[in-house]
Amino acid sequence: MPMPSRSKAGEKRNKTKLWERQPWDTDTSYANFHTYYLSQKAGKRTLAEAYRRYRRAKGYEEVEVSPPGGWNKWYYGQDSKGRNLPGSVYANAIPWKKRAEAYDDVMYRGEQTDWAEKRRQEIANLVLAERKKTPKADHVFGLEHLKLALQEDLRILADAYLTGVPLKKLAAQYHTSSAALSALLRKAGLPSRRLNEMRETIFKEYQAGKEVAQLAAAYKTNEEQILRLFAYYEITQPSPTL
């Protein structure tokens, strides 16, 4: 059998998503990347937090410990001696941060991937199977089950809703009712779509000195909705000047 050309081999490698296992990953390094680093909130990930989560999962003492050298090498995509030798699998290794950013670009901007679709289908099947057990309590059970089943995917779901994906379509993907999904999003403290569309302007006005009450009046809403918008995007209110 003829060997594939370099171009075809490159095309095959390029089909692997950056957050999926790469040639330079070991079983241990990939497991730690996926479980303790990638699972952190987008834009807030740190190697120190990944190592903290790892120690907690292993039942180690809760003390502040810097990640060991091996973790740093994994983070930067280096071999055991901290190198990216030409010709080795580490030559073009990509750091965890950039791999996680690639994941965020796909998951939080609503692009469809085989991985995301598979994940949604797995959860949908769980919800569907449980609903069949208690058909008379569809709405109530649907909400409680969604709260558990969607723990990891709630941000993806919320972002999809805020960017305009119809609630009915999202509910169909998870085999639940629009009412149950709407109740879940309300409990998650989601801001309104209208305010979300104007968030950049609202944030600028807030940073320029406008109070929450003034923003609520200007955008014909209540203070709770403005605060929900701030909380969702982790906008910290400044401390009052003494």
Image: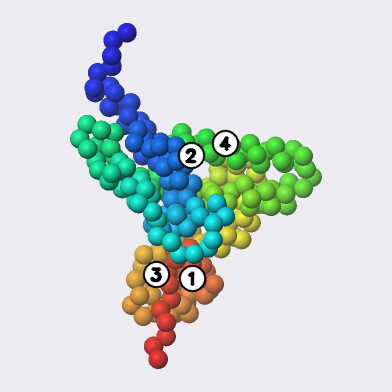
Residue for badge 1: 226
Measured as percent of width and height from the top left, residue 104 is found at 40, 48
Mark 4 to mark 3 CA distance (whole Å): 36 Å
* Quadrant location of the C terminus in the rendered image: bottom left
Q: Amino acid at mark 4?
A: Gln
User: If you read the primary sequence from the N terminus, does the residue marked by circle 1 or circle 4 appear first?
Assistant: 4
Q: Amino acid at mark 3?
A: Ile
Toward the viewer: 99 or 26? 26
Nearer to us in this view, 70 or 170: 70
Residue drawn at (48%, 79%) of the image: 213
Residue 116's place in the image compared with 2, above or below, is: below
- Badge 4 is on which residue? 121
Marks 3 and 2, Cα distance to the nearest angstrom?
32 Å
How dense is the environment of label 4, judged by Cα within 10 Å: few (below 14), some, or many (20 and up)? some
**Mark 1 against mark 4, which lies toward the viewer?**
4
Badge 4 or badge 3: first in the primary sequence: 4
Closer to the chain start, of discs 4 and 2, is 2
The residue at which mark 3 appears reads as: 202
Mark positioned earlier in the residue sequence (3 or 2):
2
- State the separation of the CA atoms marked 1 and 2: 31 Å
The image position of residue 20, as x and y in percent, is: 41, 37
